[in-house]
Each structure stands twice: as C-alpha cells, then as structure tokens.
Image (cartoon, rainbow, N blue to C red):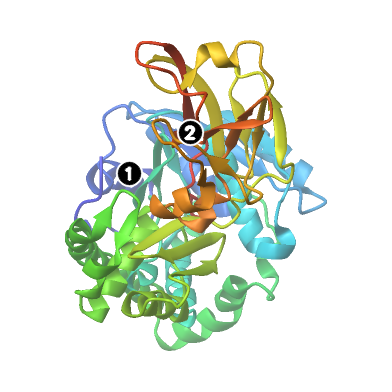
Amino acid sequence: MGNSRSIDIDTGFSPQALGRILTEELRLPANPRLCVAYSGGVDSHVLLHALAQLRAVQSLSLRAVHVDHGLQLASGDWARHCEHVCIGLDIACVVERIEMINREKDGLEAAARYGRYACLLRHLEPGEVLLTAQHQDDQAETVLLQLLRGTGVQGLAGMPRLTPFGAGWLARPLLVFSRRALEHYARAEKLRWIEDPSNRDLRHGRNLLRHNVFPVLQGHWPTAARRLAQAAQHATEAAGLLDEMARADLGSCRVAEGLQVPALAQLPASRRRNVLRYWIRERGFQTPATALLERISALVDSLPRTRQAEIRWGGVALHRYRDLLMLHPASLAPPAEPTSDWDGRTPLWFPAAGVQLRLLPTSGTGLARQRLDGASLQVRFRQGGERCQLPGRQHHHKLKKLLQAAGVPPWERARLPLLYVNNALAAVGDRWVCEPYAAKPGEPGWAVVLETPVSESRGKG
C-alpha cells in the first residue's frame, strides 16, 4: 500500500471514480478495512455514501467515526443526524464527544484539529485505513495558506494522499475532485447534510480564503484550484528528493544522542538546514520557522560561551551541549514533589520527567538485595551537593563532577532520579551504584532500570 503516479481521472465524481482512486492511486490492499471520519458535512457524506455503493461491488469493510467537539449548540443534533444516516446505509458508527484543550494557547482551529485527530487515532484499529474527505479546493487553500506563512517545500506539498497514522493509515481519496463535483453528486443523490455555521466565520484564515479570495481568483483563473493542487504534487516530488538527500547526510551526522556538530558544520548551509528540518520532522516534532532554523544553524557555527544553549518552539526544546545537538519535549521537567517514597516492587512513574523507574533482578551487579531488605526507599531529584563513592574507589565524588565527566547534559541531570536507602544515596538513576550498596560478584542484586513508557515524539495536529 502506498503512493504511486497520479492517474488520469475524470474530474466528475462517482463511486466508480472513487474506486479507481482506492485501487490504482492509493493501492489499498484487497478487502481493505476502511474507517471514515464522518463530520456530517457534504464532503464526508459524499465519501461515506459512495463507499457504501462501492461495498456492493467490492469486498471492503466499512465503518464511521463522528467526533463531536461540542462547539455548537446543535452539535448533539448533528451527532444524531450522523447516526441516523449510518443506520440508513447499514454502516456502524461510533460517536465520541471530546473536550477541547489548549484553546487559549493554540487557538480554536488548531485545538479542534488536534482533538479530532487524537480521537480518530484512538479509534483506529491496527492495519485499518482512516479516510478523510479533504478535496481539491481544500488542498488549494492549504497551499495558499502555507505560502502566506512562508513555508518551505514540505509545506507547499500540502496534504499527502496517504500517510502512516498510528497503527494504520490516513488516506485522502478526494484530493483530485473539486468541491463543485462533490456537491453535484450530493444533490443528484438527494443527500442531506449538515451546514456548520463556523465555516463562514471570516476570522479563520481558511474561511477568508474560501469566501473572499478564491471567488476572485477563480473568476480570473477558472482552474486556479486545480493548478494549485498540481503545484502541491510537484512540491511533493521535490520534497521526496530533498528527503533522500537529508537521509544520506543524516547518516554521517547522527549518533544515538543526537546530531554531531562537527559533521553538520561540514555541510553547505542549504543542506544543513535541510537535514535539520528532516531530523526534527522525523522525531515527530513541529519544524521551526525560518528565523529559528537560522538560529539553530548558528549554534553549529559557534560554540556558546556556556558550552550549552537552548532554543524552544511549539513544545520542543533543542539543545547544543558540547559537540551535540539534542531534541526533547520542552515540557519535561523534574517533578514538583522532590521526594517520593517507594516500595521497590512496582514501577514508579514520573510524568513530568518523562521517566519510569523500576528494579529488575540480576546477579553480581546493581544494588545488593541484602542491603535493601527491610530498608526504607526514597526517590529524589537533584538539589545540589550530593556525593557518591563509586565501587572500588577510596573517596566520595561530587555528583556534579561525575555527571560532567560522563557528559550528561544539564537538562538531563535535573530529570535523573536518585535512589536513597535509609536516607543515604545508593544509586544515581541507571548510571552508578554507590558504596556500600553495590552487589559483589555472584551476589543477588537489583538492576535500576529507567524507561520512557510514553513516547517523547509528538504527532502533527
């Protein structure tokens, strides 16, 4: 299953044309399992109705999910309308009402989009294909919006036809069809759909383009939407070539912890920016604006006076530490409560720090089991002044010096849990065990294990 060359298809919409898109353009497997993101609007209703007609001639599994944002007084009526339509088409429909988060921070449009896709992701089954109803005019609007934001080639590529999504796929099979063609089909089939009044709110950039800008463009250039959609396809091909180059350059720059600054410094500026964009996007983070990307590139050229520096955007933190660039979510921080009692038997999860602590049985390494039996265990985070005597050494060392010598970045040091036994420092995360708590050769022990059970990557909203 994957993208192929664009096929020459009649711009008039029909179930048969949709079937050709699914099999020849998207190359969906035989007997696909499809889940439609059904809003109740004309576009998703046309998609759902046409798929229901295809089901009679093609072997496919079909269901729908309706996300109720609760933003309109009539949203409950809309959900009931969607359920009624699905009953008439003999299609199973799941309705979920969601609570919007980060509305003030991200804006209503972004919060609604993030909440909708997060909900759809929860409902998508492994190997299932989520179908959304964006069409050619939506793609053209996306390209114009990206142009006005000063985006690069990746942004100008617009919305992909097919992309991995959770345990399955996200497909947009209507991108070759115009809004007019879909509406013509809806009227011919006497479909009844929902009109969302927020789609006429000109405070939203997409609505402003749709109602005030595109009518002017299409009055002068009748094929404007089609041409912009074609431009997106050309940008997609160019972006693929840039990604190939980025993957080649990344091979010479990447290490487990991040990117090596000396290797990045050998690249021409344009290829350096390209590999940085690809690396950030590959990690699941939002790519930075042009000005921020220039600041990141400048970190490669000159070592900060403090030998470390931080740049943040969109919930992401990028650090330069010594000769490495590293990425992680900006929200990760030491817990507000500096001390936690622990029984040592069940994993201890610190959401703020993004780590989980547990003990696994071992022999000859780790913490001596005998020293922990009946002892009081606590987990703390650095306050400063901690000391540890490493096994085989005569003296205690300042924890700060040990961490510096091991090259642990400052932001990681603050998130490193410290295990105390009867109020004495016994282990520094999964890095060191302090005397006299270290297991001797052949002695039963407990290995300290740090895990990140929640992925640090962030999906696109």
The nearer-to-camera label among 2 and 1 is 2
**Residue 125: horizontal and vertical position, in percent?**
46, 29
Q: Give the amino acid type for the residue marked by disc 2 in the picture.
A: Glu
Q: Give the amino acid type for the residue marked by disc 1 in the picture.
A: Gln
**Residue 166: horizontal and vertical position, in percent?**
44, 39
SS under mark 1: helix
| Residue that badge 1 annotates | 16
Q: Is residue 398 above or below residue 242?
A: above
Let me know if residue 40 appears in the view: no
Label placed on residue 65: none
**Residue 375: horizontal and vertical position, in percent?**
66, 16
| Residue that badge 2 annotates | 451
- Depth check: 204 or 350 in front? 350
Taking 312 as reference, is 199 left or right?
right
Let me know if residue 425 appears in the view: yes
Q: Is residue 61 above or below residue 164?
A: above
- Depth check: 4 or 52 in front? 4
SS under mark 2: strand
- Depth check: 171 or 302 in front? 302
